Amino acid sequence: MTTALAPEPSKLAEKRKKSSERGRGLGSRRGNVIAGIAAWAIGILFVFPVFFMVLTSLHSEPNASTNPPSFFAPLTLQGYQEFFGASSGASPWPPLINSATASIISTILVILLAIPAAYALSVKPIKKWTDAMFFFLSTKMLPAVAGLLPLYIFAKYLGLLDNINYLLILYTAMNLPIAVWMMRSFLADIPVELFEAAAVDGAGLIRTLRSIIVPIISPGIAATALICFIFAWNELLLANTLTSVIAGTAPVFLTSFVTSQGLFLAKVCAAATVVSLPVIIAGFAAQDKLVQGLSLGAVK
Amino acid sequence: MATATTTPLETETAKAAKKKEPKPSFSERWMNKQGWTRRFPLLPALVFTIILTQIPFVATLIISFMNWQANYPNEIAFGTLNNYVTVFTDPALRSSVFFTIVLTVTVVIVSLALGLGISLLLNRSFFGRGIVRTFMIAPFLIVPVAAALLWKHAIYNPVYGLLNGILTILGGQNAPQPDWITDFPRLAIEAQLIWYWTPFMTLILLAGLQSRPGDVLEAASVDGANPWQTFRWITMPHMRRYLELGGLLGSIYVVQTFDTVFVMTAGSLGTANLPFTVYETLYSAQDYGLASAQGVVVVIFSIAIATFLLRTVSTLFEEETR
């Protein structure tokens, strides 16, 4: 089709070159410069609140609360010292440790449950494997408030309120569908011949999992774990309903900053920065697989 | 949109399953002999999920037909529609239903449009593209509660907030100094959520743009298609599915917004959405029956969105397994 319309060869080659550049996402030179300037402007606009948060957290309280803002005020760690309880004595460590416990243990449980499940949905699929996949997906669409009340009442009558173990079990259930979908998309990429060879050699399920699947998909496991960690760390609704003093997580602790308390902006920004730090690290570590996780494995 | 096609989900998934077949002999051999060996690895995850998601929902459904207020333990009774009558007649609740819809539609559409524009920019080649991409992801990596606190105190505050600070820089001492959250409560929440969700849309749409088949783009270019024609006839049809996916996933997440409302306004000034209202009915009013009925209404909303989402995902899924 294209040959019929093709101009002379040299011109065609030139066009080919240009178009293959476009195929890699390159437009015209001038267009790229304009696009670049626009992209930089928008990027800075979006990142600016984050930058402002970190900058303010490093200012003294009087310098943090000026109008117009004092961008070039001297830097200090007072905000962080205040957040870690220098004068108030309220330490953020118990909530941070609670968050770490709930996020890390629930993530481990999720991975342990998701790998065998994904195996049964891709390597040696059960008959109605697509139905099972969509069942998992549909639970992700059931809003948290749908089950909140029974979970609350159940905990209230069994004395499980303010118990970090209860919360981490719920986080496991919350993240399991995402993990199953992601792990399945990684497992489906492994060539079947490998499993056939393992079966011929008489390897059982556990051995196949341990010596074939886990080594091959360990980057995928890492990405899945990081994304589940982020979701568990961010969660507020369940934590705020089901925990308070003892098992309160970092987001619950942050809600104590909802009402203004005099000059406290540097402290708020320090708190927001510290609590977000694990998510920022995990997010950048999982950057390449972030989209895949957020779209439940639908986009690669 | 996809509303016209009435293909039920079952047939689509069945098709997908059929297409999986051409890896035959091995999987068939196992299928018959060892059904339970196959099912066993799935069971822990399946049972766990059913216990923790389906049973609570059934309980919510049952309690929604009960008269159950924690402060009146002697009046617990089953078999009433009063909770649903209240949900649909109480003006405060009607307002929260209305705001939930407005919030979801506004945030999703604006962040999708922004995300499309930004992903088209990011798909070109320019100096520091990786850095800009990192900048664009940053908002999404701030813990939602922290992001809401940041916007409430550091950006919207009428006295020392960033917005009014910029107004002072631009307009001098007589510049207007609005109290953003009090004066524009809904807009303030929407803007914060758009900031938070645009990176998500950008990432999905950028992945979509980069999966455009290179040979088709090349053919278009050789045939002399101008950039607009390429966009209109090649990029947009290809991107439709990614736009749908982003929009629907975004809707599922935005409908469930709780953190921002809780932190920024605590549901005052007409900004209580359904998740926040359910939380309040449960936590402050301790009216379990009513909270359940509200929860059921949220679920019905979500199912409406989810039906479309499932269809979109299953189309992508089908292509992948082909």
Image (spheres, coloured by chain):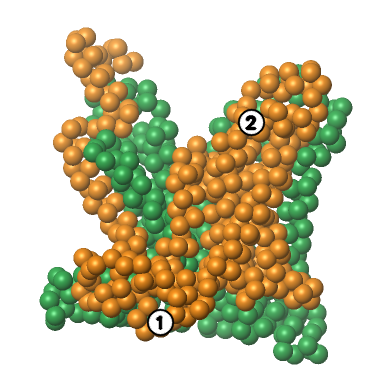
Chain colours: A orange, B green
Q: Amino acid at mark 1?
A: Ser
The chain identifier of the residue carrying mark 2 reads A
Query: Rounded to the nearest whole Å, what is the CA distance between mark 1 and mark 2?
Result: 50 Å
Q: Amino acid at mark 2?
A: Pro
> Residue at 81% across / 40% down in the picture?
B40
- In the image, taking residue A208 as reference, residue A62 lies left or right, namely left
- Residue B206 visible within the image: yes
- Counting from the top left corner in percent of width and height, residue A293 is at 54, 45
- Residue A28 falls in image quadrant: top left
- Report crowding for label 2: few under 14, some 14 to 19, many 20 or more residues within 10 A (C-alpha): few
> Residue at 68% across / 83% down in the picture?
B287
The chain identifier of the residue carrying mark 1 reads A
- Counting from the top left corner in percent of width and height, residue A300 is at 50, 37
- Report crowding for label 1: few under 14, some 14 to 19, many 20 or more residues within 10 A (C-alpha): few
- Label annotation for residue A260: 1
- Counting from the top left corner in percent of width and height, residue A156 is at 74, 76
Question: Of residues B100 and A63, which is closer to you in this image?
Answer: A63
Give above or below for A152 relative to B14: below
- Residue A263 falls in image quadrant: bottom left
Disc 2, SS = helix
Disc 1, SS = loop
- Label annotation for residue B321: none
- Counting from the top left corner in percent of width and height, residue B2 is at 51, 46
- Residue B147 falls in image quadrant: bottom left
Residue closest to the far top: A9
- Label annotation for residue A215: 2
Give above or below for A64 relative to A212: below
The mark nearer the N terminus, 1 or 2, is: 2
- In the image, taking residue B164 as reference, residue B148 lies left or right, namely right
Question: Of residues A236 and A124, which is closer to you in this image?
Answer: A236
- Residue B161 visible within the image: no
> Residue at 42% across / 74% down in the picture?
A82
